[in-house]
Image (cartoon, grey):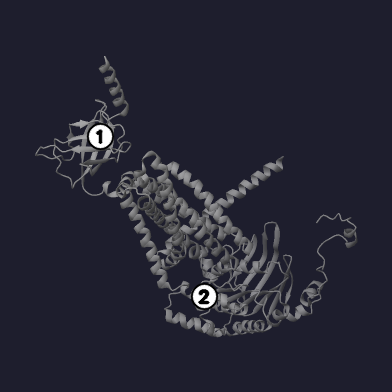
Amino acid sequence: MSVNDNNLVRIRDLHFSRGRSKIFDGIDITIPKGKITAIMGPSGTGKTTLLKLIGGQLKPQKGSIQFHGEEIPTMKTKKLYEARKKMGMLFQSGALLTDMSVFDNIAFPLREHTDLPEVMIRDLVLMKLQAVGLRGARDLRPSQLSGGMARRVAFARAIALDPEMVMFDEPFTGQDPISMGVLVQLIRSMNDSLGLTSVIVSHDIQETLAIADKIYIISQGKIMGHGSPEQMNQSESPWISQFVHGDADGPVRFHYQACPYKEDLMAECHLEL
Amino acid sequence: MFDWFAVIGRNTVDFLARLGAEFLLFLQTVKGFYALIWRPSLVIQQLFSIGVRSMLIIIVSGFFVGMVLGLQGYNTLVDFGAEESLGVMVALSLVRELGPVVTALLFAGRAGSALTAEIGLMKATEQLSGLEMMAINPVERILAPRLLAGIISMPLLAAMFSSVGIFGGYLVGVDLLGVDTGSYWSQMQSNVDFHKDIVNGVIKSAVFGVVVTWIAIYEGYTCLPTSEGVSRSTTRTVVYSALTVLGLDFLLTAIML
Amino acid sequence: MLNSRIVEISVGIFVAFGMAALLVLAVNVSNVSGFGGGDHYTIVANFDNASGLKARSSVSIAGVTIGRVSSIEVDPVTYEAVVKMTIDSRFKEVPIDSSVGIYTAGLLGEKYVGIEPGGAPDYLEEGSVIRLTQSSIVLEKLISQFLFSQSSNKK
């Protein structure tokens, strides 16, 4: 298969299920180089699972995931690890190693994967910390950081090895407006200045629409729609419209499946739940 | 009727699959020892948190167990006029059984539960996934040094337990109750066999070291990544370790006698 | 991460302590030196009866342990007990006409082999056989002898 120069990741006909529940039922996603691609959807639709599939931590039952034109699911461990060095990932909780300082956390991938002298590692770490604005926090421990700071440190660590792609797992969840703004701006500017390809998984509509170049909306294992933020905003589809505008009732019901209220009150409910 | 067989069948298959997966993980971890030759600092760090931090509880417990043995042994033996054999009794009980077994039980409570909680929390806070995505194999980087440190620590701790216990028995028996110093030591020396007693005791504690540390690591690595999952796995570590140690102890004793 | 130097030092202490404990167990508790360690030579003695004697029982002169019993077998022809003893090479000058006996330490204690030195100018060496032996005393035999002599005295 020829490698499309503009696309870093190509997912075709992906099927993945955990136990009996189907998480992905044949989805196609293309992630273009140098752009910010957002993958959105309600909670529990397996957005994080998708990132793990791209990172090769999970294997799909069926379908192809290509990174640089190479199949991730069938890769040998050694090759997979080489591919992962070209990906950075920022976890929801930051996933900083709790028994090390901020400095050591960022130095960690460098020390593990390179033979650089300590002086050079120091320079590199300070450079990354400067980029996320936390050079002064280098001696703090992860437990002393606020949620937003922890994510910025994790960001600095994710780009420590100068990857081609960074995946963000719910970067905006649970942030106050200021650190949210900081993160949004940081993702955008790093993407452009370092020539990164960014993949954002999120359900924070406003921030994501503001930053993304391309959006996929997933629900119940299917792609509900994709396109630019403007296209999503003006979408005719009632489902996408409900999701983007956050309406309480619509194609996705407000009520969990139940028998009619009146029957239930009269204790005449016979619905098999 | 057939449902019933299906349940048995499914459980058996599940059980075997889990066992196989656990064994594979164990082999991968042991394979990870190889890479540690070039990075001894990882093992030293773990020896500190596993071995050094268990040392105090082991030494204090060993001392008290030895003193109790001295007291009980003396009161039993003196009825037969055989209090000279106190040293033998204390030494054999400690070296053959109590040293390895009690050390393993204490180790499971002190170091095993801490290991499970540590690894479980690393899993719950996505640190293990994070390592994988940084192209670092958590089995080699996290599990292997801990297992190796546990295997090294256990026999050393058991030896400390036994020697401190023998000293404790000496304090009670000789200094307090008036057993002759000479007969305490000489009877001990002529009746404790190096191969049959000491070496076998060390083998036992090495086996316990593998088993207890592995249970702790496995429970942590496979726990549900929630706070409830971690706490449940921690409890399971202690319970499984205790049962396995006591069962294995019988088996090993039967084999080695 | 703790100061790595403190970690290294305390791990060093831990390992040294553990090794020391193992050494104490090996040397002080089980007396490993009497077992194969160091130079030694083997002598043999045949007893009519070696009941109560075990491998690793001590061999002594004048109450001082100089070696240990290494094996006890039955001679298939004479039905005597063949007791092999390992003697520490420090005790080289044991006269060849010494006699050995199996004694009991205390009333209920262990059996041990006692050597009574003779006066010959030659010494025991590897493989020497001691002729003069005194078997272990079997309590039941002693009692029956005593009763027997009592009853014969009365006649």
Where does the image place residue A242, in percent across and percent down from the top left?
80, 74
Chain letter of the residue carrying label 1: C
Could you classify mark 1 by the number of other residues whose Cα lies within 10 Å: few (under 14), some (14-19), or many (20 or more)? many
Q: Quadrant of the C terminus of chain A?
A: bottom right
Quick check: A27 left or right of B52? right
Residue type at numbered disc 1: Ile
As drawn, C139 above or below A55: above
Is residue B226 visible in the rendered image? The answer is no
Quick check: A115 left or right of A263? left
**Residue bearing the label numbered 1:** C102
As drawn, A159 above or below A263: below
Where does the image place residue C34, in percent across and percent down from the top left?
26, 47
Quick check: B47 left or right of B20? left
Nearer the observer: mark 1 or 2; the answer is 1
**Residue bearing the label numbered 2:** A105
As drawn, B42 above or below B92: below
Quick check: A267 left or right of C108? right
Residue type at numbered disc 2: Asn
Where does the image place residue C86, in percent across and percent down from the top left?
23, 42
Q: Quadrant of the N terminus of chain A?
A: bottom right
